[in-house]
Amino acid sequence: LRLARNLLVDVNDMGLPVAVEFLDTISPQYVADTVAWGTIGARTVESQVHRQMASAMPCPVGFKNGTSGCIQLAVDALKACVHMPSWPFVVHRC
């Protein structure tokens, strides 16, 4: 995580925005402040915890259609995020 965060900070310091796919629900809380845009992929678009996490991210988050190609999963994920409770983030201090 430290190496990944340092890389993202270095890229940000060059003035480049960073986009990532959030694969798990733990590591994003350590790098979210360095991400300009995130996405939830096809394999996790139906995951309730990924939807909750996305609703609390400090950056825009997009949802991919499901592995079947159905766009309705992404639409449902967006609708669900609007009504999510808060997500417990760890605050990273340098």
Image (cartoon, rainbow, N blue to C red):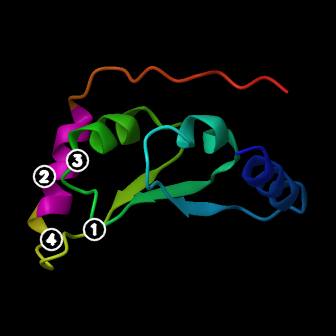
Q: Secondary structure at mark 2?
A: helix
Kindly identify the amino acid type of the residue bearing the numbered disc 3.
Ser
Question: At 90% from the left edge and 62% from the top edge, which residue is drawn?
Answer: 14
List x then y, in percent, for residue 35: 64, 51
80 is higher (above) or lower (below) than 91: below
Question: At 73% from the left edge and 53% from the top edge, which residue is drawn?
Answer: 4
User: Which residue carries the number 3 mark?
Assistant: 47
Does residue 32 appear to the left or right of 76 in the view shown?
Answer: right
Segment colored magenta: 73-82
Mark 4 or mark 2: whose residue is earlier in sequence: 4
Mark 3 or mark 2: whose residue is earlier in sequence: 3
List x then y, in percent, for residue 43: 27, 64
For the residues labelled 3 and 2, the Cα–Cα distance comes to 11 Å
User: Which residue carries the number 4 mark?
Assistant: 71
Q: Secondary structure at mark 3?
A: loop
74 is higher (above) or lower (below) than 9: below
Q: Nearer the viewer, mark 3 or mark 2?
A: 3
Mark 2 or mark 1: whose residue is earlier in sequence: 1
- Residue 77 vs residue 5, the one in the foreground: 5
Kindly identify the amino acid type of the residue bearing the numbered disc 1.
Ala
Q: Residues within 10 Å of mark 3 (few under 14, many from 20)?
A: few
For residue 27, which numbered disc appears in the image? none
Label the magenta part by its dominant secondary structure: helix
